[in-house]
Amino acid sequence: MRYAEGLVIGTFAPLHRGHQLVIETALAACDHVTVMTWANPDLPDMPTAVRAGWVRRLYPEVEVIALDAADCPPDDAPDAVQQAFTAAQVPRPVDAVFTSESYGDALAEALGAVHVSVDPDRQRVPVSGTQIRANLPEHRDQLDPTVRAHFVEKVVFLGAESTGKSTLVDALGAALAEPTVEEVGRTLWVAADGDLPLADYVEICRQHVALEEAAVRRAQRFVFVDTNAITTQQYAFFFFGECPPEVQAYADRCRDRYAHVFVCATDIPFDQDGTRVHPQVQQYQDGAVRNDLTIRGIPYTVVGGTVEERVAAVRRVIGA
C-alpha cells in the first residue's frame, strides 16, 4: 500500500534501530511522514529537544514535531487520553500510523487511519528502549553513532606544563580501550619550532574540537582529552597579552562540554624536553588553570602521584 500521510510517534528514549526501522518503513510507504515525540515528565539526561534532534539529523526528510512536557498529558495517562491528545496535535489528516506497539490499532482507529505494525515481536531488531536504558553498554550497537555520541563522556585533563597530562591520557585510553585526543596546541607548537603566531590559536581550537568529535564517534563510553580551549586561551594571553575572540568563545563552551574535568598536580619532576617554557612558570600555570575553572564554575578533581595512582583515582571518579 502507498499512503499520502504517515505518522510515527514515540518517546525515542533513546532512538534505537527498532525506532529507525519503523521510521524507515513509513518513509518507504508514504509521500510525507510526520514524527511526533514528547515525554511528561521529560527526561533530563535526554530531553525532548535532544531526542527530536536525533530524528532530524538522521531523517531530514521527515517533519518532526517536538512537544513541551508542560503541554502534554502524563506518560501514565489512560490510552484514551493519549489518543485524544495525539489527534489534537497532528497537523493534517493521517492515512497510516506506523508503530511496533500494541496501542497502534486503537491509535490508528482514533485518527481514522490504517495501522501498519512493524516488527511487533522484535524479531528483526531484538531490543527495546527499556533494555537499553537498563544496560546501555550492552546494547550500544543498537544505537546509531549520532545517538551513541550523546552518551559518551568526554574526560579532559588540564594543568601546567610537565604535569603528566599526556601520559595519563594515554594510560587511561590503553587501560579502558577508549580513544584519546592529543594536545593539538603542543603538536602545532613543535611543528612550528616554537614560533606559532596568534592567528594559529584559532586553528588549534578548531582542530581540537574536530578530533574530539571524531573520537566520540569511535568511543564506547569515554573519550580522554589532553587539554582544551581554556589552555589555548591562557597561552594566548601569556605569550601575546591578548586572545582572539573565537578562542575565547571556544573556551567559554568548555563549561558544558566535558563530563569530568581533572587537573594534574605539580608533584612530579619538571621535564624540560626543549618545548616547555620554564619550571618557574609551572606554579603560575597551575594557579591560573584552577582560578579559571573556579571563575567559570566548573567542578574539577586534582589527581597526583604515580601514573598508576592517577589512573586508579580517575577510574574511581568516572565510575570505570
Image (spheres, rainbow, N blue to C red):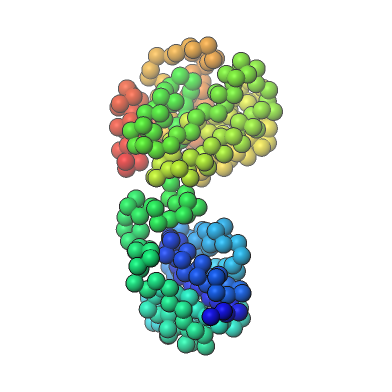
Q: Which image quadrant for residue 265?
A: top left
Quadrant, the C terminus: top left
Q: Position of residue 311 (x, y in %)?
A: 33, 30
Q: Position of residue 86 (x, y in %)?
A: 51, 79
**Side of 11 relative to 235 (left or right):** left
**In this view of the protein, can residue 49 be seen by the observer?**
no
Q: Residue furthest front?
A: 1
Looking at the image, residue 136 lies above or below residue 204: below
**Side of 37 relative to 172 (left or right):** right
Q: Position of residue 137 (x, y in %)?
A: 34, 50
Q: Residue at x 49, y 84 (%)?
A: 114
Q: Residue at x 30, y 38 (%)?
A: 316
Q: Which image quadrant for residue 56?
A: bottom right
Q: Position of residue 301 (x, y in %)?
A: 39, 34
Q: Residue at x 30, y 27 (%)?
A: 309
Q: Residue at x 57, y 75 (%)?
A: 30
**In this view of the protein, can residue 148 be seen by the observer?**
yes
- Count of number-bearing discs: 0
User: Along the line of sight, which residue is nearer the eye, 185 or 157?
Assistant: 185
Looking at the image, residue 175 lies above or below residue 213: above
User: Along the line of sight, which residue is nearer the eye, 291 or 180?
Assistant: 180
